[in-house]
Image (spheres, helix red, strand yellow):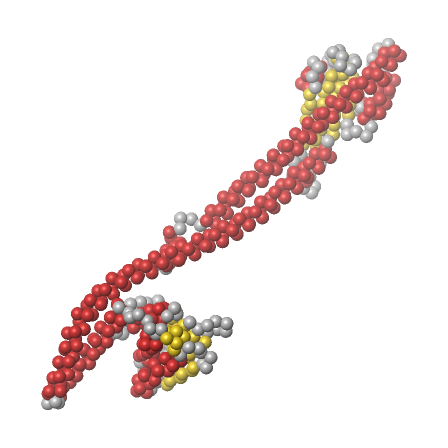
Amino acid sequence: MSSEDKTAAIKPFRLVKFFSYTTLLVFLLFTPLLAVLISKNANNVLLSRSEEYALVFASNINSQVYDRFVVPSVLRFGSLAPQHPGQQKRLDLIVKDITHGMKVESVSILDQQNDTVAYSTFSERIGLKGEGGQEYLEAREGGSSSRLIRDGSILNLLPGAKPAVFKLISYIPFRSEKNSAKIMGVIEIVQDMSDDYHEMIKLEGGITLIATLAMFLLFVVLRLIVAKADQQIDARARERQILEEKLLRNEQLVTLGKMVASVSHEIKNPLGIVRSTAEMLRKRLGGASDANDRLLLIIIEETGRLDRIVREFLDFARPRKMQLQSVSISEIVTDAVNFVEPELNQRGIRKRLTLSDRVKPLMVDRELLYRAMLNILLNSIYAMQEEGGELAVVVRPVELGREGVVVEISDTGPGIPEDRRDQIFKPFYSDKVRGSGLGLAIVKKIIEDHRGAIELISPPGTGATFRITLG
């Protein structure tokens, strides 16, 4: 499992996903609630002001009708009869004069005794009974009340929808005189406020739309912020995972290094004695027997090989402190290539060395870096198992505007399979039968100690390239 997979596995949930769902749910619930509260408040304000207006208007009608109709009609006809054509015509003129220019749909006067319409600006209503209802009964007892007829919502703003209806029917006592306790009937005032209600619905729709857009923009901004925070959390989680793995690996390497150093130290001295003894025997025998000479030569070669492995173990377990000095990287690479040139000639491998004259000296440990370059060169040579091939070495500066040097060592061998590329720099991994598996691990450590980086580029079937970046 990779570091990213491990990081994803330990995360209980995605912060952005959780925030998106919860915030969107809150906004979807809050926006309609806000619209309802605004609409309800606007309705209450409109209704309250309309009722106040109706009371003032009814008081004016009460006074005007009594002074201009009731008194003159009693004096002229001896009694009140609003249904009489003459009295009705006079009452119509008075009411129309009072309601002129006002948002009043109709004015009616209901009889005090039996809820009968005695007069109405809508003549077809005159004589109808039971029109007042509960509000009529309250007004007949001296109170004032209203009834609301409302039909419409924000959906009425859609094209083709029927107009919204908003009417307020108010019932006010019709008194004989102002502030008099005697009630002669009930005045019914119908106010058509549909236009105002339509404007209020438009306002409600506008507020809802603006609130929705504002919340959507807020949601987008917050989501971007949380997404950025989530990315930072992911990055830190990955960094923490990598650091934990590196710490664990370092602890393992420290333990392994101590063991390797101890074992290698114990092997080194007896191994040297065995090799020295074999060399002395070979000199004393002086070629007396070819078979014995061959056996002694095998002992010397194998002990030499074991000695090199032990030295690699010691170098890995107990690396020496770097001795930094200003050195030309081109010079180090050239020396390493010259050292392996006899091996190249023996194997029939062509050499191509390209050195840039723009490469500047760097502060490095010459000996350690030389060993690293030499190790990579030998790996590239051994990779080309068949006769022939080409070893290309390039030393150049990094991209313009940056300090540093890039060294690329390429071979024409079979390349390294993709499933092994992540393993080659790990300690004790080797695809050679007689290898220690520490060569490239030591190279990687030397490069990283110089604050550099090494990477492997190996497209299938086209050889391998080791790219080292220093500086």
Q: Residue at x 42, y 77 (%)?
A: 361
143 sits left or right of 178 in the view: left
Q: How many marks?
A: 0
Q: Residue at x 75, y 19 (%)?
A: 187
Judging depth in this view, the residue of 72 and 440 nearest the camera is 440
Where is residue 402? Give x, y as percent.
Answer: 48, 71
Q: Quadrant of residue 384?
A: bottom left
Q: Residue at x 32, y 59 (%)?
A: 247
Where is residue 356? Give x, y as percent.
Answer: 45, 81
330 sits left or right of 434 in the view: right
Q: Residue at x 40, y 57 (%)?
A: 238
Q: Quadrant of residue 464?
A: bottom left
Q: Is residue 287 above or below residue 457?
A: below
Give the residue furthest to the right.
76
Q: Is residue 126 visible?
A: no
Q: Is residue 413 above or below residue 113?
A: below
32 sits left or right of 365 in the view: right
Judging depth in this view, the residue of 186 and 404 nearest the camera is 404
Q: Quadrant of the N terminus?
A: bottom left
Q: Quadrant of the C terminus?
A: bottom left
Q: Is residue 268 visible?
A: yes
Q: Is residue 448 above or below residue 103?
A: below
